[in-house]
Structure formats: C-alpha cells, structure tokens
Amino acid sequence: MCDTFVATPGATLHGEMILAKNSDREPNEAQNVTFVPAAKHPRGSMVKCTALEVPQAERTRACLLSRPFWMWGAEMGVNDAGVAIGNEAVFTRERYAKSGLLGMDMLRLALERSASALEALAVIAELLETYGQGGNCGYEKKLYYHNSFLVADPRDAYIMETADKYWAVKKVSGTASISNCLTIGGDWTILSPGLEEYALKSRYLKPGRRLDFARDFSDRLYTHFAKGRVRHSCSATMLALRHGQVTSLDMFSLLRNHNMPEPYRPGGTPMERICMHAGGLVSSQSTGSMVAVLRAGRPPLVYFTGTAAPCLSLFKPHVLVEGQKKPYANDVTSRQEDGSADLYGSAAGVYDKRTLWWTGEAVHRRALMNYAELAPEWQAERDELERGMVVEVEKRWRGGPAKTLAKTCAAWTERFIKKNARIAEEFADKYRRLSPIAPAWYRLYWKRMNRRAGLVM
C-alpha cells in the first residue's frame, strides 16, 4: 500500500511544484534508487519490462527511480524534463488480469517517454489500451490490483485513476493526495473514451446520473481493509493546513506521519499509518520514500531515503539534468549492463551490509523492538541535519549553476550515507543493552522476517 501527495505552485512557500510518495511493500522487498541514462535506441528495438516486451521508443529520457529490486518498473520517479510520478494500488469492480504491464512498468515507460505531465498521461492511456494492466505485483505473496497515478511537472498536476483499461483524470488545484482508494468523483476533468457507456452497460451507473468514478468503480471490501481512505483523509487534512506554506521539509514530515501520538508504538492498526511498519497479519511497510521539487527553468531536485521507514531515515538530495548520461559519482554506485546504476548499491531480498537499504533495515528493525528508547534522540539529530542540508541545497538550486548544485548534492548524500552507517553501529550497541518492549507476537513476526533475510540482530 502507498501514499502520494502533491502541492502545486500556489500552495507552496516558494512557488514550486512538490510531489512526495511513500512506497509500501513487503518487509524483505528491498527497493533501489536507480539512475537511468538518456539514450537513443535502434528503430524497431524492444524493451523487456517486468513480464512483457513492448516496442522501445527511439529516444528515452534520463530518470531517477525508486524501484523494487525484482522489477523493471518503478514505484516513483522523476525524469530530466521535470515530470514526476507516483502510483498507488487501487481495488475496483473490474477483473484483475493475470498478465499485462504492471503499474510500475507504465510509470517508468511514461517517465522515459514524456516531456510534460499531459504527455505522461497520454503514454499511460495508450499503454492501457494497447497492452492492458495486469500480472502479479507481489514479491513473495500474490497481489493483483489496478493503479492510480499522481503526475506532475513544474506547472501542472493530475490524478489519473484506472479500472482495467478504463480511466478518469482530474486536474489538481492547490494540494491533493492519493492512496489505496479511488478518489475521483463526479469532478473528473477527462474520461477514457467509452467509459460512460461501459458503466451504463455494466449497471455501475444508473441512467440519468453523472458518472462518479470512485462511487461507480470501487471495490468496497478491499478498499475498506486497505485503509486508504483513512490515510487519504489524514494527508489531505495536513496538506490543507499548510496551504500556501508547503516546503520540502513539510513533505518529509508528512511521509513520516504515523497518524498517532509519538513516539510510535509498534503494532495495532498499522494500515492506518502513512509511515507504515509491518507486523502480524500486515505484510506491508514503507520501503522507500521520495520528494521531488520542480520549477520551470531549473533541473528537478529529488530527495530519496533509499531506505525503508522514513521516520528513521535521512532524505538524500539528487539533481537530474536534461540528457544526463551518467550518474554523479558515488562510492556505492552499482552499474548495470544497460547503463543504469543503483546509486546506493543493488540490494535484493537478503541482508547485504554493502547496500544502504539493508543498513537502514538494521536500524529500523532494532528500533521497532524498543522505539521509545531508540528513535527520538536520533530523530531530533536527523531533523537538524536535514534542515541544514535543505537550506544549502535549495539556495544553490534556486540560483546556482547545475554543476555546482550536483557537487553539493553528492557531498550531502555521501555524508548522509556515512551517517547512516554510524547510526546502524550505535543502534546495534544500544540494542544489545536494552530489553525489547514490543509485544511478543510482534517480536515473533520480525524474528521470522529476519531469519528469512539472513539478518542477525
């Protein structure tokens, strides 16, 4: 399960577009931050997505993606034209196909092929019509769903919600959020061709009524248990309270929100948390987070955690320039044959101390056993570090050359990666001296997850 938010230029303090997302997936499903270079491709070539091959575009854009390690596609990302997208699982009355493009595949294809938010919507619509959406979206468990997308560029933002090959689009004014529920009612901006006729034929829509996409196409049972409406209400309220003042730091804070008093107490209705932690019957947690800051005439500025649990993570800054061919230097970059590179190491489904994602999990999983003792002191230090980083990076971003900005981002990212390693060591030492206070059933759940990942606590 996931949550994505956007604040348009009129709703932010400095007049930028800011899009943010938490990607919620299975606990041992590592998520890598991947750089994809701008490229030219031979006419008639194909690209292998997660399960399907589709014709490749002759030119593709440079992208920064947050990607479950086993997928070709991505949960969220930004391209060098300043288009940013996050997607959500949604549950509808339409069937879920056993094969097709994953929503994550469509997201990456749209970023590689679009120069604006409207172009990205057109790419997704064409992919839905041509190939359909479908396939197992789960890592160790089977999971089928349809997709919604929040798509933004420096000027405009749109919500696109789908049910099989059908879709509705709503232009965003002010702030908006999407979660694991359909949200577009009768206030849609554009509908896919034939949607109203299909809804009438299927008896989803009564004659004489205006089509309400959420009312007419939602699967109420799965939507209820996913608790997307609870999280959507929380994020929409918090964004509205900051209207006209939203900053990247506000988005960091919202992605860390537990929708309960702090310090967070592990267990108990975890699906209602924007910053989600798995446990018990719930097999989903926030495994990666992104905040993208977009302004016309400036390269996109993107913050990634590269780790799960944003409440315990540092956001690291990156910049992406048009036509970029190589990632900026980073000691833990892991390059792939196609020219792409996992910027923090190529994490997979088992513990690997050489990767940032698993170093972060060593911090996260120890904190869950005694959150009140381990987390608050580190969170206060983290907030101070991030404030200093954002002030310096965004000052250079608004007025300095891209080359200087890239060096500044790389320096902060390297500093934060080293800090993460030190915190992992500190937490390991404190964990040995503290008694776990999390419920016994919760400790048992994480013992099983750790054993499967080969993570020794």
Image: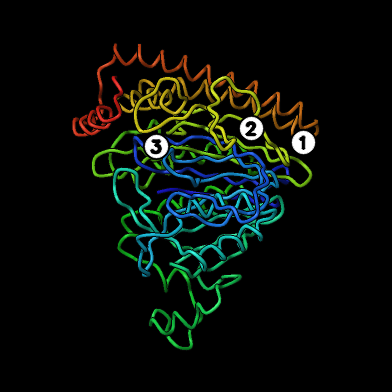
Give the quadrant of residue 65.
top right
Seen at 70% across and 47% down, the residue is 81
Q: As shown in the figure, which amino acid type bears the numbered disc 1?
A: Arg
379 relative position to 58: left or right: left
In the rendered view, would you say 79 is above or below 93? above
Q: Which residue is mark 3?
A: 261
Q: Residue 271: horizontal and vertical position, in percent?
A: 34, 47
Q: Earlier in the sequence, mark 2 or mark 1?
A: 2
Judging depth in this view, the residue of 296 and 240 nearest the camera is 296
How far apart are the alpha carbons under marks 3 and 2?
32 Å
Residue wearing tag 1 = 398
Measured along the vertical axis of the image, is residue 168 above or below residue 65? below
What's under tag 2, amino acid-wise? His
Density class for disc 3 (Cα within 10 Å; few <14, some 14-19, many ≥20) is few
Q: Residue at x 48, y 83 (%)?
A: 197
Q: Residue drawn 68% across and 37% down?
A: 320
User: How far apart are the alpha carbons under marks 2 and 1?
Assistant: 14 Å
Mark 2, residue position:
318
User: Of label 3 and label 1, which has the lower sequence position?
Assistant: 3
Q: CA distance from mark 3 to mark 1?
A: 36 Å
Residue 326 vertical placement versus 114 (above, below):
above
Could you tell me residue 152's position as x and y percent? Answer: 63, 53
Side of 399 where 415 appears, left or right: left
